[in-house]
Image (cartoon, rainbow, N blue to C red):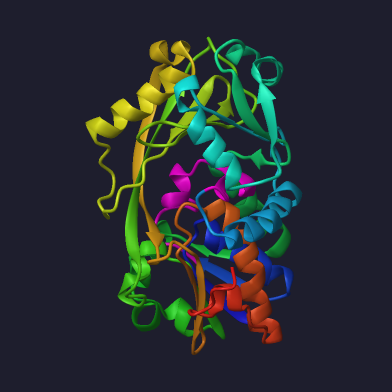
Amino acid sequence: MRVRIVGAGVAGLTCAHAFAARGAEVTVIERKSGSGQGCSWYAGGMLAPWCERESAEPIIAELGHESLAYWRASVPDVPNEGSLVLAPPRDLPDLKRFSRRTEAFEWVDGARIGALEPDLEGRFDQGLFFPTEAHLEPRKALAALTRLLVEEYQVAFRFAAEGVGNQCSEVDDQCSEANEADLVVDCRGLAARDTLADLRGVKGEMLVLYSTEISLKRPVRLLHPRIPVYIVPRGDGHFMIGATSIENDERGRVTGRSMLELLGAAYALHPAFGEAEIVEIGADVRPAFPDNLPRLRKRGNTLYINGLYRHGFLAAPALARRAAEVAFDGAYFPEVMDEDHRQW
């Protein structure tokens, strides 16, 4: 089977892996100059199905458990340190509400928090610890996955630098690479609105701080009065702080208000972040359907994987496995293919 995958973000790369592992001849077509340079570039990389269960439907946790196993098996450097959810004493009701909406956690007191994260000792009285969760560095993970695809599966890549890129903005009409395929897998994210009219954009803003005064082993979520904030350690003193969810499709620009709130929340976690160096600011637009759940749609010889919203790394591998089974085995997955499915 000749498969052409359009889009080299986390959805496109995991689909390339799933199809190549089944013996397909796979070409990945990307309008940017390299893989993982869209929304995936700004992702937090938290593999936290139980934490996400607090604000997402159960299907996200189910996809997330499968994807968590995938990342642990497929790429190096996936720290399995769990996740920590904290709140200032005045926001303890929010922490209790969070706990009621999820599971697979332990209530931890101040002493236990200090044992897990010594630099947070004495700063919080209670928290939730999710021991089975993990995290990764998205840029390194996708670079490793790209190398795996090329070296082990002979997947071909066509980037903008090779004269392909923007010719694939309309998959069916303009991309000769796609027209020659037995199957096209459209993983373009928000760019697929030319075909998937019910997609919308949800802007996310993030920043990266550098500090040698604080160390964290695992992602920490701080329940903030206005926006829930997470701090993800990236190693070598770098921390990713994210992320806003703004209902617009404006790319690139980070607002002053968002910057203040992200920095303020990081400072509330630990004052050392007040002296940290800001080394990166970024924003992009996540693709989402009206219910914020992902979809796998089949139209003719094209499969569309889209609507990953905030859950790209958490959902993409599980969706990719389903897409390959649809193509090779004629499988049907109502949880992501039936538009009226409400079981989840």
Residue at 27% across / 37% down in the picture?
254
Residue 198 is at least partly visible in this image: yes
Residue 222 percent location from the top left of the image: 49, 29
The outermost residue toward the bottom is 300
- Which image quadrant: the N terminus? bottom right
Total label count?
Answer: 0
- Which image quadrant: the C terminus? bottom right
Residue at 69% across / 14% down in the picture?
111
Relative height, residue 255 to residue 297 (above, below): above
Residue at 46% across / 64% down in the picture?
7
Query: Is 104 displayed left or right of 304 in the figure?
Result: right
Residue 155 is at least partly visible in this image: no
Residue 175 percent location from the top left of the image: 39, 77
Q: Which residues are magenta?
A: 29-54
Query: Is 110 displayed left or right of 12 in the figure?
Result: right
Residue 151: image quadrant is bottom right
Q: Per the image, is 62 magenta?
A: no
Residue 242: image quadrant is top left
Relative height, residue 330 to residue 306 (above, below): below
Residue 316: image quadrant is bottom right
Residue at 25% across / 32% down in the picture?
257
Residue 68 percent location from the top left of the image: 69, 51
Q: Per the image, is 49 magenta?
A: yes
Relative height, residue 336 to residue 222 (above, below): below
Most foreground residue, 175 or 208: 208
Most foreground residue, 313 or 74: 313
Residue 157 percent location from the top left of the image: 53, 63
